Image: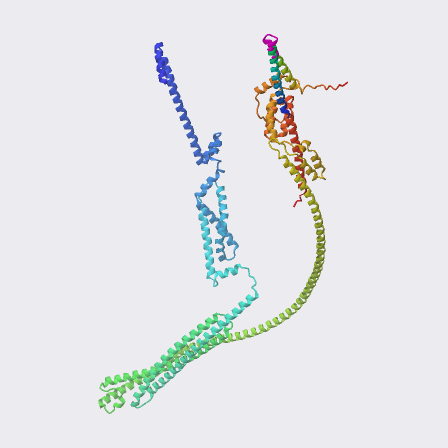
């Protein structure tokens, strides 16, 4: 359309003016420029708006994410705090907290380190305070649970104090070392305590607990327990000792027997050997003798072996007995001591006997050895001689004594020569021997001396041992005897003390008994007195209560009588009031008997009834006499009828509105009728609270009255209608009187009913 | 009923005016016919008289309340 206009304009311009293209173009340009300028401007504006909006949105979002930025923006840009508050809500309370939170989040180990530090501190404190090391370990695990809260509080304090988190390797290491140290110390302590004979757990409670006196029963129980234990131990020890004693005795006896047997065997053997060596016995018996000797040797070896085994057994038994004795000694139980002592004595005796027998055996053995050496020498000489002889005379066998007949003279000569030679040799040896005799004897003596010394030493040592043992035993015996004596004496003393104690206790008890008796008697007498007084009090109370009850009952009776009387009176009153009320209601009802145009029935009867029922009330009488005569004789019209009548009256009153004393000609009547025809007023208009002079216009008044009547306000309507003047007034006069009558009657009746209600309410007794 | 009075008055008035008018008219007609050679002026005169009398009567009737009649109680 614009372009069409343009074209038209161009055409006309071209037609009209020659050089108007420029202007047209200008116009066009203006238009287009305006267009472009308009479009361009819009675009610019839109772009600007978008930019600004984007900027604001972006700042808001970023401020939401970063509170520092938000704070900065709020500080620098004037009304940004309001805008940001609107968009995001109030800012976070402190700027420091997020930093704290971040810092708290980053190094969680910091908290642990802090708790460790505080734990170490608490540990140190505990260690200083506690006495025993074992008890430290138990409270330490309990304490950290409590101290973690403290530690966390401390940690927050520390963290809040520091603005930035600094790396804390140093304290961790040192306190770790400290913790380790403490742990090591604890362990060391524990170890030392463990190394002690007593268990550390049992030690610590007894150490940490203050020493308190244990109750007597406990002590007695413990003592009894201890006695029982001792008894048990004693019996067991005695049994074991007996057993070991018997076994060792048996073994020892056996050993002794074996040793004796061995001794005998050895002596027999040596005797036999001696006999065999020295006796010149015929050859037949010689083999028998040798056989005997061998048997004896076998016996001896057997006996010796037996003796050795028996000895070893005996030694074992004795060792076991010794160990048992040592163990029982180690138990440190007094009852065991005599048994131990006896056992030791027995042991000692057995050892002594065994040693004696062993020495005997050894001596016999040594003798036997000498004899056997001698026999060996002799045998060796014999054998050598035999060899010599055999070497000289090979065909000759042993036992050269029996060979005298078989040998030849050469052999004999050789033999004699050999014999001579041998004799010479032997003589020479003998001479040598004689020469060396002394030396040999000395050597032998020396040897003997040494041996004797050794034997002596051995004997001495054994004797010493025995004597020591005996002395010790003696000492122990004496000690035990002494102990017994002491015990007996202690017992006597204790008995004496106990007797003294019992005497003292008896005296004290007597005194206490006296005191207690006196106290008890006192208490008894006081209680008796109390009971007496209480009894008297109670009886008095009872009496008082009884009289009180009687009085109350009498008063109540009186009250009840009065109440009944007042009830009767009140009922009478109530009846009267009721009657009045009923009559007033009847009167009220008669008012309702008005129909459309018929007045009510005459109120005479009802009024008479009312008058009858209110003799004593002047007010009611006055009221009942105040009823208007007309209502009494003729009755009154109902409001509805009055309303209907008014509606018909209204048009009439309108028509004669202009007529009054001065204006009452027919012409005035005509004008009045014309006015009524032409004037339109509200059918009903709400009357104002105060009537002004304008409102006294009859039309207005009638509309007000109509409104009032429609709304049931007869009184106001009557008042308004009363304001009519002139002919209109004359016209509505009758209506007004009727209305007045009705109003009067109604007022009186309402007063009477109010009065009757009041009287009725007054007479009803409140529950 | 005071409201019916006016109606009654108007009834009387109308009746009276009708009578008077009619009578006047009639007399006028009569007189016109008898005495005045059928001129119209006696008719109009008669009706006029009649109307006037009716008017006056009506007005008087309607006004009657406002005019306090002196009680003539002079009996000599």
Which quadrant of the figure has residue A581? top right
A679 w.r.t. A173: above or below: above
B37 magenta-colored: yes
In the image: residue A491, left or right of residue A74: right
In this rendered view, identify the residue nearer to me: A259 or A393: A259
A97 w.r.t. A129: above or below: above
In this rendered view, identify the residue nearer to me: B36 or A247: B36
A465 w.r.t. A111: above or below: below
Q: Residue A469: x and y, percent?
A: 47, 75
Q: Residue A6: x and y, percent?
A: 36, 16
Q: Is residue A402 visible?
A: yes
Which quadrant of the figure has residue A513? bottom right
Q: Quadrant of the N terminus of chain A?
A: top left
For the record, the magenta segment spans B33-47
A444 magenta-colored: no
In the image: residue A491, left or right of residue A377: right
Q: Residue furthest bottom?
A: A405
Residue lying at 40% horizontally and 22% vertically, measured from the top left: A41
Q: Is residue A699 visible?
A: no
């Amino acid at each position: 359309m614009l372009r069409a206009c343009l074209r038209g304009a161009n055409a006309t311009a071209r037609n009209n003016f020659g050089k108007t293209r420029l202007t047209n173009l200008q116009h066009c340009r203006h238009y287009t420029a305006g267009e472009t300028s308009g479009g361009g401007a819009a675009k610019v504006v839109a772009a600007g708006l978008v930019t600004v909006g984007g900027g604001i949105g972006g700042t808001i979002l970023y401020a939401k994410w970063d509170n520092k930025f938000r704070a900065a923006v709020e500080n620098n840009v004037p009304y940004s705090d309001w805008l940001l508050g609107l968009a995001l809500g109030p800012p976070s309370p402190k700027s420091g907290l997020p930093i704290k939170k971040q810092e708290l989040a980053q190094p969680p180990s910091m908290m642990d380190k802090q708790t460790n530090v505080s734990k170490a501190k608490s540990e140190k404190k505990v260690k200083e305070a506690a006495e025993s090391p074992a008890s430290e370990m138990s409270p330490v695990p309990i304490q950290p649970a409590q101290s973690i809260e403290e530690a966390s509080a401390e940690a927050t304090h520390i963290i809040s104090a520091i603005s930035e988190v600094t790396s804390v390797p140093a304290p961790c290491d040192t306190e770790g070392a400290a913790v380790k140290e403490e742990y090591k110390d604890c362990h060391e302590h524990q170890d030392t305590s463990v190394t002690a004979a007593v268990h550390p757990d049992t030690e610590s409670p007894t150490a940490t607990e203050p020493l308190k006196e244990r109750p007597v029963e406990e002590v007695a129980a413990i003592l009894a327990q201890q006695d029982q234990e001792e008894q048990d131990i004693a019996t067991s020890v005695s049994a074991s000792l007996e057993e070991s004693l018997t076994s060792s005795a048996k073994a020892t006896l056996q050993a002794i027997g074996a040793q004796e047997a061995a001794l005998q065997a050895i002596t027999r053997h040596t005797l036999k050997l001696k006999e065999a060596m020295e006796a010149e016995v015929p050859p037949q018996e010689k083999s028998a003798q040798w056989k005997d000797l061998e048997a004896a040797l076998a016996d001896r070896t057997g006996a010796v072996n037996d003796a050795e085994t028996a000895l070893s057994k005996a030694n074992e038994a004795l060792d076991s007995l010794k160990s048992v004795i040592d163990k029982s000694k180690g138990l440190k139980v007094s009852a065991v001591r005599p048994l131990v002592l006896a056992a030791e004595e027995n042991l000692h005796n057995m050892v002594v006997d065994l040693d004696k027998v062993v020495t005997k055996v050894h001596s016999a053995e040594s003798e036997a050895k000498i004899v056997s050496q001698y026999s060996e020498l002799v045998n060796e000489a014999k054998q050598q001689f035999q060899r010599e002889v055999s070497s000289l005379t090979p065909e000759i066998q042993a036992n050269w004594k029996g060979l005298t007949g078989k040998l030849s003279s050469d052999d004999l000569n050789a033999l004699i020569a050999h014999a001579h030679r041998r004799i010479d040799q032997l003589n020479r040896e003998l001479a040598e021997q004689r020469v060396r005799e002394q030396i040999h004897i000395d050597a032998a003596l020396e040897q003997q001396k040494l041996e004797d010394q050794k034997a002596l030493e051995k004997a001495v040592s054994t004797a010493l041992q025995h004597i020591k043992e005996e002395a010790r035993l003696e000492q122990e015996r004496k000690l035990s005897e002494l102990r017994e004596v002491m015990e007996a004496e202690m017992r006597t003393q204790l008995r004496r003390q106990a007797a003294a104690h019992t005497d003292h206790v008896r005296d004290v008890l007597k005194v206490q008994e006296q005191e207690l008796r006196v106290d008890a008697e006192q208490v008894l007498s006081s209680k008796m007195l109390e009971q007496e007084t209480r009894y008297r009090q109670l009886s008095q109370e009872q009496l008082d209560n009884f009289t009180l009850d009687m009085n109350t009952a009498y008063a109540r009776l009186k009250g009840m009588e009065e109440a009944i009387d007042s009830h009767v009176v009140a009922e009478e009153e109530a009846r009267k009031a009721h009657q009045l009320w009923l009559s007033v209601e009847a009167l009220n009802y008669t008012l309702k008997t008005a129909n459309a145009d018929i007045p009510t029935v005459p109120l005479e009867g009802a009024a008479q009834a009312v008058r009858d029922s209110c003799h004593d009330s002047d007010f009611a009488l006055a009221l009942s006499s105040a009823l208007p005569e007309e209502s009494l004789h003729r009755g009154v019209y109902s409001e509805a009828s009055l309303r209907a009548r008014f509606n018909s009256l209204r048009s009439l009153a309108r028509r004669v509105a202009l007529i009054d004393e001065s204006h009452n000609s027919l012409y005035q009547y005509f004008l009045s009728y014309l006015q009524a025809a032409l004037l339109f007023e509200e059918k009903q208009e709400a009357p104002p609270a105060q009537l002004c002079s304008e409102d006294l216009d009859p039309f207005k008044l009638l509309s007000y009255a109509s409104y009032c009547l429609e709304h049931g306000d007869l009184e106001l309507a009557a008042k308004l209608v009363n304001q009519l003047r002139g002919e209109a007034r004359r016209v509505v006069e009758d209506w007004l009187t009727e209305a007045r009558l009705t109003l009067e009657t109604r007022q009186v009746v309402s007063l009477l009913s109010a009065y009757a209600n009041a009287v009725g309410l007054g007479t009803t007794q409140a529950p | 009923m005071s409201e019916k009075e006016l109606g009654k008055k108007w009834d009387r008035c109308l009746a009276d005016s009708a009578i008077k008018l009619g009578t006047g008219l009639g007399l006028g007609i009569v007189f016109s016919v008898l005495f005045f050679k059928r001129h119209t002026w006696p008719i109009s005169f008669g009706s006029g008289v009649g109307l006037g009398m009716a008017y006056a009567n009506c007005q008087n009737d309607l006004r009657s309340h406002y005019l306090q009649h002196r009680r003539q109680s002079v009996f000599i």
